[in-house]
Amino acid sequence: MIQNFAVQLALLADPSLNGPIVVGGLPFEAKPVYDVSAEAMAYGIKPGMLLSQAYALCPKARFLAAREEKYQELFQRVINILDKFSPVVDVVELGHAYLDVTGVKNESELGHEIITSIAMDTGLKARLGISSGKFFSWIAAFISRAELPSIVPHGKEDWFVAPISVDLLPCASEIKERLHLLGIHSVGQLKQFSCGVLAAQFGREGILLYELSHGIDRCPLIPRQKPEVVIEVAEVYPPAVDYIHILYCCEIRLKKMLSDIEAQGKSCREVGLKVRLASGNLVEKRFPLKEATNSTALILHRLRTWLEGVRFSAPVTEAELSLWLTKDQGKQLHLWLQGQRVRQELTKVATELKLRLGYQPLKKWEPVTPTPLLPERRFRLTDVGG
């Protein structure tokens, strides 16, 4: 668990920042709060509330723009680190993931190694909890210190969560409110009730409350589907330091790679470039794309933007391109919108489909004039764009 992910990244970029920090935008922008520091949270500011509300609670807070693309890129590096420690990594959301460490003899040593690896590679402070279940591990990480992993002894899970507030249970907020009204404020208090009583009161979630309060967690780890990656190496000959020659060598390989993956019905969602210098050093960069694409021009633009600003200490001898793939899901149009732009876009799509398939699969309803007497004959199907 990496708490206050966006705030941590802001502090890494500008160590001089201090006091209450609100990430999401400027106070006058109609946007929600993305992340807050502990100092800002003390004023009642929470992620999800409007920035204007946050400003009203703490006008002296530093308001910063969110950099979601950067957050995802950095978190991907964290996931890559976790992949080295376990074959099963369950990614929940930004800054929140689980991994299977079954069979590890020295859990404390492993925890320290994971935390240290994340800190050295990204500069982020991670919290880590180890237990027999996802909920108990999350609680352990939540209450632990960033530099010290928290380990829940096997068989002591119910004892560990007993003093924890019911507000941290993975159930609906309405159930938590009802628990407080019934005078139940900690997880341990739930142990006085049978499974049947809790199920009668709260349905299926009542069974979950019973099991968690007794140290039972049946929630399985769901391994993330690792992306497919294709890699091509382009030799830069003669070795060069100017980006134009390097980009040209990449372009030749990139066109072939994109042609092959497009034929497979797939698209590129992330690009990696690793260049090897004559000195033996490596310089690499990954470029997440806003949406999956097979556009050579778009990907080359991202590569050019980075290469223009890099000064290599020695000539480049080799460029390695990596493309992370995803299945081509097509492009969705907002058909409920009206206007000339949408009609033009539909006509364009319809034309492309007709050229590809040899017939027009898209149809639209049109009223028949003059209006027939039979209702089923008052409309007809015609080709879109026809």
Image (spheres, helix red, strand yellow):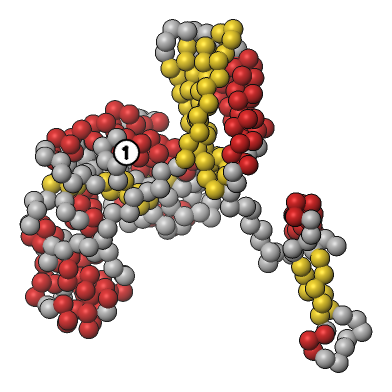
Q: Count up the numbered dots.
A: 1
Where residue 84 sits: x, y (%)? Answer: 29, 35
Work out which residue is located at the far bottom of the displayed protein and give it: 373
Nearer-the-camera pick, 25 or 327: 327
Where residue 307 sits: x, y (%)? Answer: 56, 21
Q: Which residue is mark 1?
A: 83
Question: In the displayed structure, does residue 368 sit left or right of residue 262?
Answer: right
Q: Residue at x 33, y 29 (%)?
A: 121
Q: Quadrant of residue 382?
A: bottom right
**Vertical placement of 102 versus 12: above or below?**
below
Where residue 256 sits: x, y (%)? Answer: 63, 30
Q: Is residue 181 visible?
A: no
Amino acid tagged 1: Asp
Nearer-the-camera pick, 228 or 282: 228
Decide: few, some or many residues near mark 1? Use Cα within 10 Å; few <14, some 14-19, many ≥20.
some
Q: Is residue 119 visible?
A: yes
Local secondary structure at mark 1: helix
Question: In the displayed structure, does residue 107 sit left or right of residue 19?
Answer: left
**Vertical placement of 146 versus 176: above or below?**
above
**Vertical placement of 295 versus 242: above or below?**
below
Q: Residue at x 50, y 33 (%)?
A: 230
Question: In the displayed structure, does residue 323 sit left or right of residue 256?
Answer: left
Q: Residue at x 52, y 8 (%)?
A: 315
Name the quarter where the C terminus is drawn. Answer: bottom right
Work out which residue is located at the far right of the displayed protein and give it: 370
Nearer-the-camera pick, 120 or 215: 215
Q: Residue at x 64, y 35 (%)?
A: 259
Where residue 130 sits: x, y (%)? Answer: 17, 47
Q: Quadrant of residue 72?
A: top left
